[in-house]
Image (cartoon, rainbow, N blue to C red):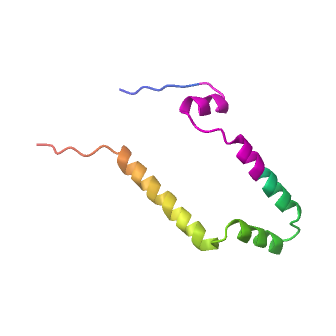
Amino acid sequence: MKVNVEVDCSPEEARRFLGLPDVTRANDVYVDAVTKAMQGVGNVDQMQDLVKQMAPMGQFGMKLFQQFMDSGASMAKSASTPPKKDSD
C-alpha cells in the first residue's frame, strides 16, 4: 500500500512545524558579508583570493566535505533499504 500526503504551507510554516531554528538573521548577515566582499572583485585573481579566504582548507576541505556528504548519503540509503528475506 502506498500513501501520499501533500502539505501546502509556506517555508516559515514548515520550519515551525518541524521545529527547525529560525536562521533568518544569520542568513542576512552572511548574505550581506558576501555581497560586500563581491563588490570589490574585479577579476579572476581577486575572486580566487576571496574563495581562499572563505575556504581556508582549499581543495582538501572541499574533498573532505564531499566525502562526508557521500558517506552520509550511503548511510541513509542503506538505512532506508529493507533487509532481504531468505526464501525457504
Q: Is residue 13 above or below residue 28?
A: above
Q: Is residue 44 above or below residue 76?
A: below
Q: Is residue 1 above or below residue 32?
A: above
**Which residue in the rendered view is the most extreme toward the left?**
88
Which residue is at a point 37% across and 44% down the rendered structure image?
80
**Near-viewer residue (18 or 80):** 18
Q: Position of residue 63 (x, y in %)?
A: 55, 68
| Residue 16, quarter of the rendered image | top right
Q: Is residue 33 left or right of residue 7?
A: right
Q: Which residues are magenta?
A: 8-30
| Residue 41, quarter of the rendered image | bottom right
Q: Is residue 62 above or below residue 85?
A: below
Residue 68 lies within the magenta run:
no
Give the position of the N terminus as an image quadrant: top left
Which residue is at a point 46% across and 53% down the rendered structure image?
73
Residue 24 lies within the magenta run:
yes
**Near-viewer residue (32 or 69):** 32
